[in-house]
Image (cartoon, coloured by chain):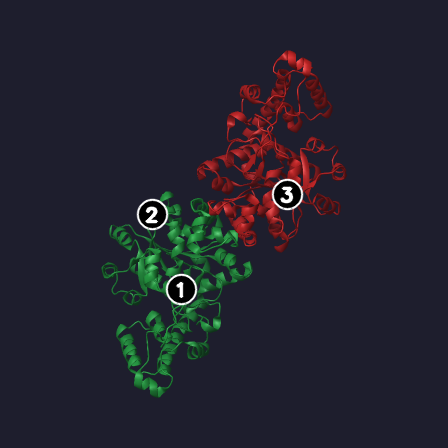
Chain colours: A green, B red
Amino acid sequence: MVMIKKASKVTPWEVEGKVDYDKLIKEFGVSRLDDKLLERIKKHAKDLHPMLRRKIFFAHRDLKWLLDEYDKGNKFFLYTGCGPSGPIHLGHLGTWVFTKWLQDVFDVELYFQFTDDEKFLFKDKSYDEIQKWTYDNMLDVIALGFNPKKTFFIVDTKHANLMYPEAIKVAKKITYSTVKAAFGFDDSKNIGEIFYTSMQAVPVFLPCVLKKRKIPCLIPLAIDQDPHFRIARDVYPKLGYDKPAIIHSIFLPPLTGTEGKMSSSNSDKAILTTDSPNQVKKKINKYAFSGGQASIEEHRKKGGNPDVDVSFQYLKFFFEQDDAKLQQIYDDYKSGKMLTSELKNYLIDKINAFLKEHQKKRELAKKQINDFMLKN
Amino acid sequence: MVMIKKASKVTPWEVEGKVDYDKLIKEFGVSRLDDKLLERIKKHAKDLHPMLRRKIFFAHRDLKWLLDEYDKGNKFFLYTGCGPSGPIHLGHLGTWVFTKWLQDVFDVELYFQFTDDEKFLFKDKSYDEIQKWTYDNMLDVIALGFNPKKTFFIVDTKHANLMYPEAIKVAKKITYSTVKAAFGFDDSKNIGEIFYTSMQAVPVFLPCVLKKRKIPCLIPLAIDQDPHFRIARDVYPKLGYDKPAIIHSIFLPPLTGTEGKMSSSNSDKAILTTDSPNQVKKKINKYAFSGGQASIEEHRKKGGNPDVDVSFQYLKFFFEQDDAKLQQIYDDYKSGKMLTSELKNYLIDKINAFLKEHQKKRELAKKQINDFMLKN
């Protein structure tokens, strides 16, 4: 198989080409999540989350400091978010499911930011459309089972009275030169896009403002979001706050291959949380990039390549929690014992079982939104 | 007298050199306020305000349209504001006193914006210091006697829930290139400064948002603030609103001469609304640039120059309402009949009479702030 190596690009708004995570670790200046740190997390949980065991979360900033603080009795809070510009797909869920695990294991609060301003400013969509997606996306987040007593939704435009006064304190310490370099902006960017990163910086210390004391912050995120906090890191101490700890994940690949990340811009090529069992079946069968051979005969003889097979990647990311079972599928697919159709069917069943439950909880979530909104 | 001609600079944050208002009219693309328009305003008032008669307000945008709408029964609202970064001085009051006259004559609502975000972002002052000045400056505005039933204070950070969602709609349609050209920014500007103009654009249509209908807007301002609206003018129709009408004033010169504008950055060289009678006397006598001659003998012989004399300018701007009296002072000073000390004493008495009343009302204003705040 010939792999054409394209230059990759990773910013909060674009992930293109085959992502070289080793290179990103160097470029972004983050650290690899090593076994020593994983052991420390394991002390607090019955077992490590599969996304940690499988290095889906693979890098970090200042996690040692955060765990030191926790062990001293200084609890952190979690901060993650969602840019509401379309339907939620499986690619979004990984970070949030892992965040929920962290919330449960460490028994901590979560501030969840809906960056409706960002999506309005960066996308060719109307304000009303973005508001519609904000509501819609909240349902998916709630459906994942976060603790409503310890989870606080921030909607940038709805919580502007809290957010904007803090954002300008951040903005005052960031020049246009800095965002230009970090995000690759040029002068044709609108002035809201340029300002926006200061809004994403705020939840790192908003709980400190509200509670009038320093509280450590841990941000689980996909690594494309890191540049926001790389910019803001130097600002926090100047405002009297600690830099946040961050734990970074790789991207769930799009159905069509292992380059870039799953996106809902093309809903045919992503599995949405609202897809019917039949839609899931059709999308996986039609689009999920296969590591199998051209014919059954050839596959039986030569075997498939699970490392590029998207269905296998989805099982590894999310849908097969059992390591032994995953290893068996890997071996069987590689040896040719398991066919692509069998692998796809296995995944389809797993996804549909998950979505059946998720869609039920998503309906119930419609009555819970108010319970989750941060009191303004 | 040798006048050294320096290049002038007029932006919302800098007014330097001798301002050439004819050149500004061309550069900014505004129109001169002609007699025909003044006649139309006069129809609604017993008499034209001295600042109109004396061409202190000298230029406009779309005023004809605004008066046409008014005559059709479509009332406008007024929008002006204050950047709270220091004490209020006499230079601030001109626009506001004129705005009050417009409110009374046309019986219209006024939205008064305190741009605390702007001043925090552009000045080397703390957030708390700016908040202190916001409160302080409100007292001066209230003391001028605005109708609390028809006057609504907007504080950018306190009304961010209303302002920020609208500001991003403006921001989305303004590129960095545009603000760079209009304000002369470079890439070392902070990202809040770059975003800020979209906050100043909002009150032009905020009442339309609140009342869910189009309402014409008239902005009285000193001409240095025009670039904000020059940028935003093209944006308003794209958001479904009318462009505002604007009426522009020249600047009250600083005590020390007729270049630039009065500023409170150096409180020795500006008359503050909180100055005691003695401070006023000292400042006028010590700093007010004189058009008189070097000795009494020479003054009696050659006469003074009221056109560059700052004390005379202050009488013309603000403190001598009576045109005949002003003309007499002009003639007497020019002929040498009136000495500089006499002119200064006349002005000192006028200012102190005004400030005595103003300071009383300023005290009473402390209990009225809530009545003026726009309900959020």
Q: Decide: marks 2, 1 in contact (CB < 8 A)?
A: no
Labels 2, 1: front one:
1
**Label 3 belongs to which residue?**
B28
- Asked which secondary structure carries label 3, the reply is helix
Q: Decide: marks 1, 3 in contact (CB < 8 A)?
A: no
Q: Chain of mark 3?
A: B
**Number of other residues with Cα within 10 Å of mark 2, as a class: few under 14, some 14 to 19, many 20 or more:** some
Closer to the camera in the image, B9 or A267: B9
Residue B356, x across and y down, in percent: 58, 23
Q: Alpha-carbon distance for marks 2 and 1?
A: 32 Å
Q: Alpha-carbon distance for marks 1 and 3?
A: 45 Å
Query: As drawn, which residue projects farthest toward the top?
Result: B297
Q: Chain of mark 2?
A: A
Q: Quadrant of the N terminus of chain B?
A: top right
**Label 2 belongs to which residue?**
A242
Which kind of residue does numbered mark 3 sit on?
Answer: Phe
Quarter location, residue A105: bottom left
Closer to the camera in the image, A303 or B20: B20
Question: Does B324 appear above or below B24?
Answer: above
Question: Does B277 appear above or below A167?
Answer: above
Closer to the camera in the image, A83 or A190: A190
- Asked which secondary structure carries label 1, the reply is loop
Which kind of residue does numbered mark 2 sit on?
Answer: Asp
Question: Does B192 appear above or below A349?
Answer: above
